[in-house]
Image (tube, rainbow, N blue to C red):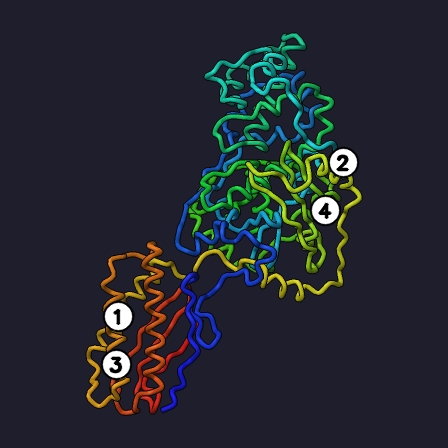
Amino acid sequence: MDVAIPNITFDEEDSQIEVSGHSLRNDPGPYDPSVLYEQDEHISSAVWEGLERGALRCHEHTSKLEEWKLTGKQLELVEKAGFKYFRKIEAFSLDNQLISALVERWRKETNTFHLPGGEMTITLDEVALNLGLAIDGEPVVAVELEDSSAIPVCEKLLGKKPTSNDRRGGFLKLSWLKDSFSHCPDIAPLEQVEQCTRAYLLYLVGSTIFSTTSGNTVPVIFLPLFEDFEKAGKYAWGAAALAFLYRALGNATSKSQSTISGCLTLLQCWSYWHLNIGRPKLNQGQALDAFPLALRWKQKLSGLRSKCDVVQYRKALDSLQPCDVEWLPYHDMDEIVPEDIKDTLILGRSRTTLICLDKAEKHLPDRCLRQFGFNQPIPQEVPQWKGTDGEADQSKSIASSCEDWSKHRDQIVEGEDRVDDSEYLLWYSNITRKFVGRHTSLESMFRQTVAGMTKMLELAKTLSREDMFPVNQKAVENIKNILNESLKNPFSNSKDRRYTKFLTMRIARLVIHLAYLRDTSPSDKFSFRSFTFFIIDGSILLFYIVPVDCDSLLLEMVD
């Protein structure tokens, strides 16, 4: 007898079954790994396997900023240093759950969020608009210190030595800065005013744009940048803040990471402007002409929105469509943007290298042209570069990155209105991670699979084999053995990867025997009607047992 058994293959390493070339795995991508080449290390891979890490701990330390009392002379120095607008934001409530869900969509290979409808990112112009920081100017690079410890530079620029309890190596405790310098007398001499102002600026950047995961500390290496206030005002602080945030986002995508730092106020405001997910109402207490724009969202988390968890936000992002995105949220705000900021907004379209001390990160607006009102073509390839703390920054040096930054005004990306997005979307569907979470949890799939196998075993036991061919009797016996073996396995839950792999291998064997039985059984041997199903890594296998001529056991795949 010729038996038409489907071509069934099983990849033991990936625990994936293919029947006649069709994968039973509901693969979220990427199908083409040339762009997202670090997928295996990305948090989205862990989430897909059912390994939830929960909400990230968000390290911004803005709650004490309002305790700093600045004199008029200090405010003049703060403005001269480039923080005139930024200092107004102060404390900002963070939605850790939303931030954690956004991190799952961030890709450090492209420095963009990979959303269902295409890539998006935080661009330089959005830093200027939301934070009021300069995005044009000199790169923020480290000043070489004769002594890398905190004591000499603090004594020189702050007039005080931190004790061993006030510092951790090259880091100063924010609490020491606040306790020692937050109240400068009105009649203080100029030297003391400058010292207290440097301490404030170091505290400001250390608790916001350059916050670290080390806790409530700030690297002392930033302090020399405020030695000369006028020179400090020439730095592109906004570009450095974005480089720092890009790096922090990239680090936070690692499976093992549980914290995130950088300017999370900027990240959250960006999400509020563009995505109607977890978005509160605009702060009615702020005037419509309030600047910087982050002030519009400055309020306490309250109501149902603060009760959303990472999974809920993840589902909302997974179902996001291009029509749900506000691509041009700032289009009617020209009148409230200060002229010194407005003149630099074109740099949002600069394809350049952002620098913060020893960190260099690519700014790639050509991948997100819809944020500038253009259609999106397929972007050019991004060269691979190192983007994780502790590793070398790119193959080129920071000096070379500074040279690239010096050309940022000459590297403005131009868009084309006539570009057809469909070609881009087809390309994007192959290179992206389509979704992060499963429609059904692995735990639920596991329970359904075990219940389905139990039901199938009950059906197999009631099956009469008297008139079957010997080969079919053997197939039924094999099916019963496989089911018994699967259900008696000591690994008892879906989070145990050993059991998941074990179960998938048994189902692969089960499919083969069922397919054989389907094609070899006489038509009059099955008189019952029922069905059960298995779910394998996101795909459903439905086994229909129906009294149909010559197809007594029908195997159908449903994605």
Q: Nearer the viewer, residue 329 or 482?
A: 482
Callout 4: SS? loop
Question: In the figure, 81 relative to 426: above or below?
Answer: above
Look at 65% across and 27% down and name the residue there: 142
Q: Secondary structure at mark 1?
A: helix
Give the numbered dot on residue 351.
4
Q: Please state which amino acid type lies under the numbered disc 1.
A: Leu
The local crowd at label 1, few if under 14, some if 14 to 19, many if 20 or more residues have their Cα within 10 Å, is: many
| Amino acid at the residue labelled 4 | Arg
Q: Position of residue 418 (x, y in %)?
A: 76, 63
Q: Is residue 272 above or below residue 115?
A: above
Up the image or down, 464 lies above or below 114; here it is below
The circle on residue 483 is 1
Query: Would residue 461 be visible to someone looking at this image?
Result: yes
Q: Residues within 10 Å of mark 2 (few under 14, many from 20)?
A: few
Residue at 68% across, 48% down:
364
Q: CA distance from mark 1 to mark 3?
A: 14 Å
Q: Nearer the viewer, residue 55 or 534?
A: 534
- SS of the residue at dot 2? helix
Give the number of the mark in front: 2 or 3.
3
Give how far apart the Cα atoms at labels 2 and 3 are: 83 Å
Q: Amino acid at mark 3?
A: Lys
Q: Quadrant of residue 397?
A: top right
Q: Which residue is mark 3?
A: 474
- Earlier-in-chain disc, 1 versus 3: 3
* Sequence-first disc among 2 and 3: 2
Marks 3, 4: nearer the viewer: 3
The amino acid type found where label 2 is placed reads Glu
Where residue 268 appears, as percent x and y from the top left, is: 55, 42
Few, some or many residues within 10 Å of mark 4 (<14, 14–19, 20+): many
